Structure formats: structure tokens, C-alpha cells
Image: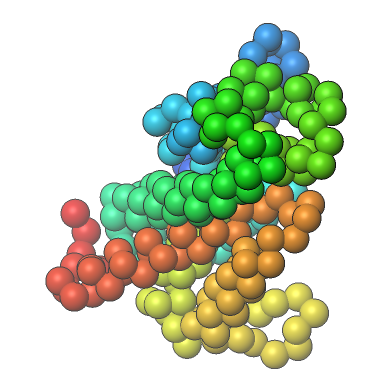
Amino acid sequence: MINRSFFSSIPPVTKNLIIINFIVWFALLVFSHRVAIDINDIGAIHYFGSPLFKPFQLITYMFIHANFAHLFFNMFALFMFGIALEMVLGSKKFLFYFISCGIGAALIQEAVYAIYIHSVMAKAVALLGTPESSILEIIKNQGADAIAQGMNFTDPILGRLNSLYNVGTIGASGAVYGILLAFGMIFPDRPIYMMFIPIPIKAKYFVIGYGVIELLQGLAANAGDNVAHFAHLGGMIIGVFIILYWKKNGTLFNRF
């Protein structure tokens, strides 16, 4: 039997964010195959140079997840760390922080995409001997079909560009990593217990460890790794600046 007092004890923003994410996931699961458009693709954040990019995606991408496991672990982390943060920050400030970290994560991921695309585009121009605009036309208008029809040794390069231009990023992970960062800064010595590790880890070391892992994985750029590691780092970076600003102004625990 569900304990109603348990749910009523969860602060409103944390609770509603979790509910909304589960509702969106269920709605897309039920209705995505019944409509002619790809709702996931519309809501995902795309590279700003792509014709698929829309400004509203800076918000919507946070509420779309690839699968139930992706959703569950993000919402579990939000539940574990968001409750304490919302209680000390207040609901309005906590919501502002969550959304800001999510948007910041997307913008930093966009910047990383831009740097990488510039590098790969230079290689494609050199190999094909054609202007950048011509390559973009192939990617934007013909996409993977044209790339698959015999671009020979340039296939891998054009394939990467096509993926970056036309494949979106989804998930609340950037915002959740911001929540994790804030927890580590506000409760640095609070112990965190992890499965398979017999001793507790202080929150500050837990956060540092996660940040280092994301940085190394992002720099490694392993083939087949479809995780937006720099978006995770982006959420943490934005979180650092917001928390430090609130601390400096003495407003960290004030509610607005």
C-alpha cells in the first residue's frame, strides 16, 4: 500500500519534475508510433547550425529520455539529492537552479559540437576538394542516404558530420549533474553510500570523482559512446558559478 505521507513529504518542485518526466516518457511511449512526426526528434536539442534546431529545445530536451533506464537513473538521482537541496534553497530557487543548469549544459554541449564540427569539416573540405557549403548541402538535404552511396574514403568523416548535424541530445542528465554538484558544495562532508563500495564517500569527493570521470570520457571520444559527457560537465560548471554567486551575496539559503 502506498504511503501518502511519504509523497507529501517530497518538496513540490522535485516531486513535480519527477512526475512530469515520467508522464512525458509514458506519453511518448504510447503515442510516438501513432503520429507521423518524430516527437522525440523535435524535442531533442540539435546543433544550432542544423536545420532541425529550435530555441525551445533548450528546455524540452531535459524532459525526454532514450529509455526507461535512462529516465529511472536520472529521476532517482534527482530524488536522492534534490529533496535536500530544495529544502535548503526553497522551491523557486531550486527550480531556477535546475532549469539554469539544464540550459547551461545544452549551451556548453553546443560549443563542444561547434569546435568538433569545425575540425571535422576542415578535414572533409581538404579530402573532397569542395567548398564547405557544398558539404553542408549533402548533410542537410540528403543526409545519410547520400553518404551511404559511395563517398569512398570520406564516408567516416561525412558520417560523423551527419550525426552531429542531425542527431539530437536528450535527457535531464545535465541538470541532474548540476544538482549533484550543488549537493557536494552545500553538504561537502555528508556521507554517500554506493553499491559495491563498503565504505561511505564524502559528497565532495563523490562529486569530484564524477566530474573527473566525465571529463576523461568526454576527451576520450570513444567510438559508439553516445553519451553527452560535456553536457554533464556543463551542468556542473554552471552550477559552480550559481552556487558561488549565491554564497558571495549571502543569498544561498534565502528564498525568493
Find residue 64 and report its image quarter. Answer: top right
- Residue 132: image location, x then y, percent: 54, 34
Q: Nearer the viewer, residue 117 or 189?
A: 117
In the displayed structure image, the side of residue 213 where residue 238 appears, left or right = left
Give the total number of marks visible in the rendering: 0
Towards the viewer: 154 or 116: 154
Residue 5 spot, x, y in % from top left:
52, 52
Question: Does residue 155 appear left or right of residue 36 in this picture?
Answer: right
Residue 99 appears at what percent x and percent y? 39, 47
Residue at 51% across, 63% down: 233
Q: Quadrant of residue 40?
A: top right
Question: Which quadrant of the figure has residue 247?
Answer: bottom left
Q: Report the quarter where the C terminus lies.
A: bottom left
How is colour applied across the structure in the image? Answer: rainbow
Position of 147 with respect to 165 (left or right) is right
Looking at the image, the residue that sits furthest to the left is 249
Q: Residue at x 69, y 60 (%)?
A: 221
| Residue at the spot 18% in from the left edge and 75% down from the top edge | 248
Question: Residue lying farthest bottom?
Answer: 199
The answer to whether 169 is drawn above or below residue 248 in the figure is above
The reply to whether residue 21 is visible in this rendering is no
Q: From the viewer's perspective, is residue 114 above or below residue 195?
A: above
Where does residue 37 sit, x and y in percent of width and height? Answer: 64, 14
Q: Is residue 104 visible?
A: yes
Q: Check the image and name the residue furthest to the front.
A: 129
Q: Nearer the viewer, residue 112 or 226?
A: 112
